[in-house]
Amino acid sequence: MKYSKGFATMASIIIIIALIVGGVVYYVTKFPSSPIENTETNNQSLQQPTLDTTAIQPSSTTSTSNQAALDTETSTTANCNQNQFNSAFLLISPDINNQKTKEFVNFLENLKTRFEQSFKDATYGTSSVKVDDIFVTNIGSENYIDNPSQIDFRSVLKELISKKDDKYDFVSVFTNYDPKSNSDYSFVVRNNIKNIGYENIFDHSDQYGSAGKLLGITFHGDLFSRFKKATTPDEYGNIYLSEVEKDLFGVGVLLHEIGHFWCCYIGENFIGDGDPSKLEILAENMHFYQGLESPSKTQDVLGTVPWLLDENNNTYYRDNSFNTYPYRYHPITLYLMGLLPKDQYSKEFNIFDIGTTLNKDPDAIKKYKTISVNDIIKFSGERACVN
């Protein structure tokens, strides 16, 4: 279905806001005081259509699901090409025994199962994450009343690892109070992969009590209170989240921030000047450009959207149902994660010129150029581990 220009303009504003909102990676090595973005949420009803398998050219499908699975030939070498990850949910609470803490832990127990399944689905079955522990501590919240946004992540992580061992690839941190940052964000602790956009190789895991295991940390503040607010009837008794949306609350932001451990730093921000030597696939230096095509009937958590061809005039228009589709990482993200089979490297994706401020009519867009993983390799060299 194609929308009128007026409707499309209004939809554009809404969708642009939804895509820009989200996490920010601030590098421990370079930008310890980077600004924080607004919270990413997803309040759209999710359909579960059959995945368009031709979009990613899978080599095989799983017998237990109707969704496509990539034929993974990836190594499980620890620290770089691994496809199995361990995680923890860490809740900072000034009073670890109060009622809200107990309710928050129950919320995280439910989120844990949904997140583990969603991560597996988002990687087309090529990778998994296991949330080993939900750990509650009052460390790091000593000054939460006067300075709630200042959290001592080093002390918090050292406390966790000293009690539960050095087994986590990433840790998601929550607070039982409003941190006043109004944001979800992530930061990378260790990187030993070259040619994915990082300027250098670094390992600061020892500052967090880890001996080279910890990859990074995501932060989500008082996610439980945000969930309660979204599921509490308004003054007219209305609740605006469907049961599916309630079930998936928090999953998208976790996938988004964890995806930032690998994406999106390779290439350049979209300019649209026609220079064939540029790899114009980014926006804001850390998200994909919305004009980069995502596989059909998928919802990429890092910025791309699917596009549809208008055969009457040979132009394209944005699939405005994208936020009803299941969460999936873009194949380029899977490459950066080390999960994409090499026979997928030649698969091309369109880039559409929707302007540097996403201000062009999304109902009449022409193809700007195409991009493949092979093009990324020509631009930066092939992804490789550094021991």
Image (cartoon, helix red, strand yellow):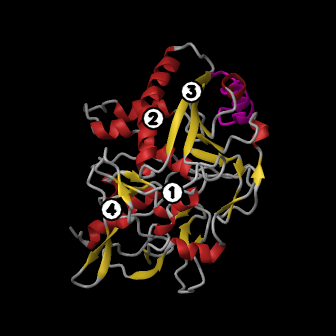
Tell me which residue sits at (33%, 66%) in the image.
Answer: 54
Q: Earlier in the sequence, mark 2 or mark 4?
A: 4
Q: Are marks 1 and 2 in contact (CB under 8 Å)?
A: no
Q: Are marks 2 and 4 in contact (CB under 8 Å)?
A: no
Tell us which disc is closer to us: 2 or 3: 3
User: Which residue is tagged 3?
Assistant: 133
Disc 4 versus disc 1: distance between alpha carbons? Answer: 18 Å
Q: Residue 305 at what x, y percent from top left?
A: 39, 64
For this view, does 368 lie left or right of residue 82? left
User: Which residue is tagged 1?
Assistant: 73
Q: How many marks?
A: 4
Q: Which residues are magenta?
A: 137-159
User: Which residue is tagged 4?
Assistant: 53
Vertical order, 8 against 122 (above or below)? below
Disc 2 versus disc 4: distance between alpha carbons? Answer: 35 Å
Tell us which disc is closer to us: 2 or 4: 4
How many residues crowd mark 4 within 10 Å: few (<14), some (14–19), many (20+)? some
Q: Secondary structure at mark 3?
A: strand
Tell me which residue sits at (51%, 57%) in the image.
Answer: 73
Q: Nearer the viewer, residue 233 or 84?
A: 84
Q: Secondary structure at mark 4?
A: helix
Tell me, for residue 226, which label it has, or none.
Answer: 2
Disc 3 versus disc 1: distance between alpha carbons? Answer: 29 Å
